[in-house]
Image (tube, grey):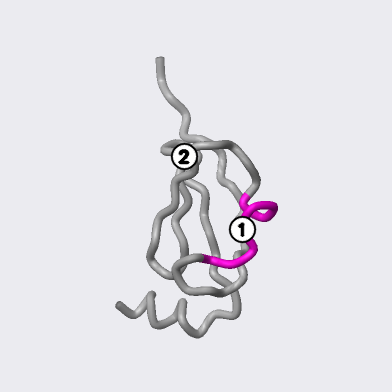
Amino acid sequence: MASLRAARDMKNCIWKLDPWHGYYDSACGHAYVFEHEFTVGSAYAFCPGCGKPIELAPVKAEPEVEE
């Protein structure tokens, strides 16, 4: 609950892409999946969950898979 309180105090809603599973986690506690590939910044300027401007977090490298 403390992290959601901190998210309310933030200026933007930070979205983190999970490249492994293909969805975005938002700072306000929602997850978003999109059927069509696009950049979030071009299609969504504001978070549907909290209404704040979306800020994309840097994408981490995909986890390495051992063969």
Where is residue 32 shown, x and y percent of the image? Answer: 44, 52
- Give the residue displayed 38% in from the left and 66% down from the top: 29
Residue 10 quadrant? bottom right
Q: Nearer the viewer, residue 65 or 22?
A: 22
Which stretch appears magenta?
A: 40-47
Q: Where does the N terminus fall, quadrant-wise? A: bottom left
How far apart are the two marked residues, 2 and 1, measured between alpha carbons?
17 Å
Indicate left or right for 18 with 58 as reference: left
Tell me if residue 51 comes above or below residue 60 in the rendering. Answer: below
Q: Nearer the viewer, mark 2 or mark 1?
A: 1
Question: Which disc number belongs to residue 22?
Answer: 2
Label 1 is placed on what type of residue? Tyr
Magenta span contains residue 22: no
The residue indicated by pointer 1 is 44
Where is residue 24 shown, x and y percent of the image? Answer: 48, 51
The outermost residue toward the top is 67
Q: Earlier in the sequence, mark 2 or mark 1?
A: 2
Where is residue 59 shown, x and y percent of the image? Answer: 59, 47
Secondary element at image label 1: loop
Tell me if residue 54 comes above or below residue 60 in the rendering. Answer: below
- Give the residue displayed 38% in from the left and 75% down from the top: 3
Magenta span contains residue 43: yes
